[in-house]
Amino acid sequence: MRTVTVLGSTGSIGCATLDLLGRAPGAFAVEALTGAGNVALLAEQAVAHRARLAVTARPDLYAELRERLAGTGIEAAAGPEAVAEAAARPADWTMGAIVGAAGLVPSLEVVRRGGTLALANKETLVAAGRLVMAEARRHGAAILPVDSEHSGLFQALRGERAEEVERLILTASGGAFRDWPLERLVHATVEEASTHPNWAMGQRITVDSASMFNKALEVIEAHELFGLPPDRIEVLIHPESLVHALVGFRDGGLIAHLGAPDMRHAIGFALYHPAREALPVERLDLAQVGRLTFREPDAARYPALGLARAAMEAGGLMGAAFNAAKEAALDAFLARTIRFTDMARVVEEALDRLSGAGALPSLCRSGDIPRLEDVLEADRLARETARELVAAMGEDA
C-alpha cells in the first residue's frame, strides 16, 4: 500500500486527486491532507479517506478543524508552518496542488526529503525553478508535472533523446475573451472572466486563463522543467482544448498529446507513473470531433506572454517577481480595484521598477541558484511594489 499526501486537497486538483484515490480501495493510505479556508470540506475529506493528519493553512480556523475532527483519531494542525511540516512527513507520493506562491515552501519540503512530487503548483517552478530542480537532483527527488500541458509534454518525451528535441508547444484555449473585440476588454467584469469555455477550474486560474497569465506561467515552468531556452517554447491558441501539448523534433516531426479536458488524466498519469492504469476519463471520438483548430496568440490581447518572456530573459529572481506581481494584480482585479486590462500594466511596471532599481539583481545574479530567502524577499518586494501601483491607480481614477 502506497502512502499519499495531498497538499491543497480542497481545491479542484485536490478533489480530483481524492476522487482517483477513492476509486482504488486498498491501494493507498492517506498520510496528510492540507487546505485553507474550507475546513468543513477538509475535515470531511480527512474522515472519508482516513487521513492521519489534516492541516488548515489558517491558524484562525484551527479550533473549528479540531472540533470537526473530534473523536476521529485524526490529528489536526494549523498555519503555514504546519503545512510545511505535513509536506515533510514521509509519504511515497505527494500531490502539490496549493494555489500560488504559498505552495513553494511545502514543495521544497517534499523535494528535500527525496520524495515523489506530483506538481500541479506551477508557481513553485516559476518563482524558484533553478533552486527546486537543483534540490531535486541533490536529494534524488522525482518531480512529475501535473499541469495538463506539462504532463502532455512529459508523456510525449518519454523514450526520446533530449538532443533531438527542437521545440515545445503549449496550447491554450484563449480563455473567456479570446473572441472579444479588443476595445471591450477594458470593461470585462470579474464574473465574465471567471467563466472558462472548456475547463472546470477554480476562480483564480480561470481568470488567469482569460488574461493568459496562466499560460505565461506555464511557459516559464516548461523552461525550468525541460531545460529548453525560451525561444524554443511556443504557444498556440487551440479553442477545442483537446491537444494539450506538442513536441517538435529536429527531423520536422511532431508528437502531440490529446485527451479530454479532464485533469484526472494528468493526475492519474502521475499517480501511477511509470505504469498506465485505467482512468475514469472520456475517450475521444475524433470522427465526432471532426476538426482541430489552431492560431497564433495576439500579443495585444495577451501581453502576459511577452512579459513572461522578458522575465525569462532577465533571469535571476525575475520569475519570482513576475509571479508575485501577477498574484497582487489578480487580487486587485478580483477586489474590483483595477480593470481587467490593468493587470498586465501593473506587472510590467512592477518588474520595470524592480529591475531598474537593481533591487532584484542585488539579491541574486542571473544564472546563479538562488537561496530560498532571496526568492521570498523578491516575492515580498514585488507584491509590495504591485500594491503601491494599484493604490496609485486608485488615486488617479
Image (cartoon, helix red, strand yellow):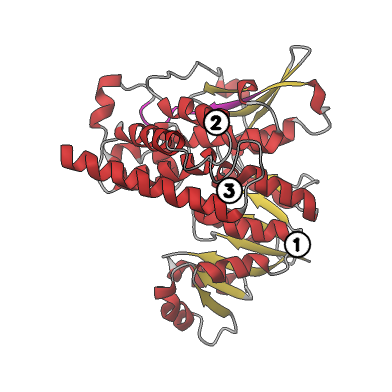
For label 2, the crowd category at 10 Å Cα-Cα, with few meaning under 14, some 14 to 19 and many 20 or more, is: some
Residue lying farthest top? Answer: 252
Left/right of residue 143 with respect to residue 65 in the rendered view: right
- Say which label, 3 or 2, has the lower sequence index: 3
Q: Amino acid at mark 2?
A: Ala
Pinpoint residue 319: horizontal percent, then vertical percent: 53, 39
Residue underneath mark 1: 92
Of residues 225 and 66, which is closer to you in this image? 225
> In the rendering, which numbered label is found on residue 314?
2
Residue 260 versus residue 132 in the image, above or below: above
Magenta highlight on residue 181: no
Q: Amino acid at mark 3?
A: Thr
Pinpoint residue 296: horizontal percent, then vertical percent: 50, 16
Check disc 3 and report its element: helix, strand or loop: helix
Q: Nearer the viewer, mark 3 or mark 1?
A: 3
Q: Nearer the viewer, mark 2 or mark 1?
A: 2
Q: Residue at the location (49% across, 52% down)?
A: 377
Left/right of residue 203 with respect to residue 169 in the rendered view: left
Res. 130 visible in picture: yes
Pinpoint residue 53: horizontal percent, then vertical percent: 60, 75
For label 1, the crowd category at 10 Å Cα-Cα, with few meaning under 14, some 14 to 19 and many 20 or more, is: some
Of residues 364 and 27, which is closer to you in this image? 364
Magenta span: 168-177
Disc 2 from disc 1: Cα separation: 37 Å
Disc 3 from disc 2: Cα separation: 18 Å
Pinpoint residue 220: horizontal percent, then vertical percent: 58, 34
Residue underneath mark 3: 124
Residue lying farthest bottom? Answer: 71
Check disc 1 and report its element: helix, strand or loop: loop
Q: Amino acid at mark 1?
A: Asp
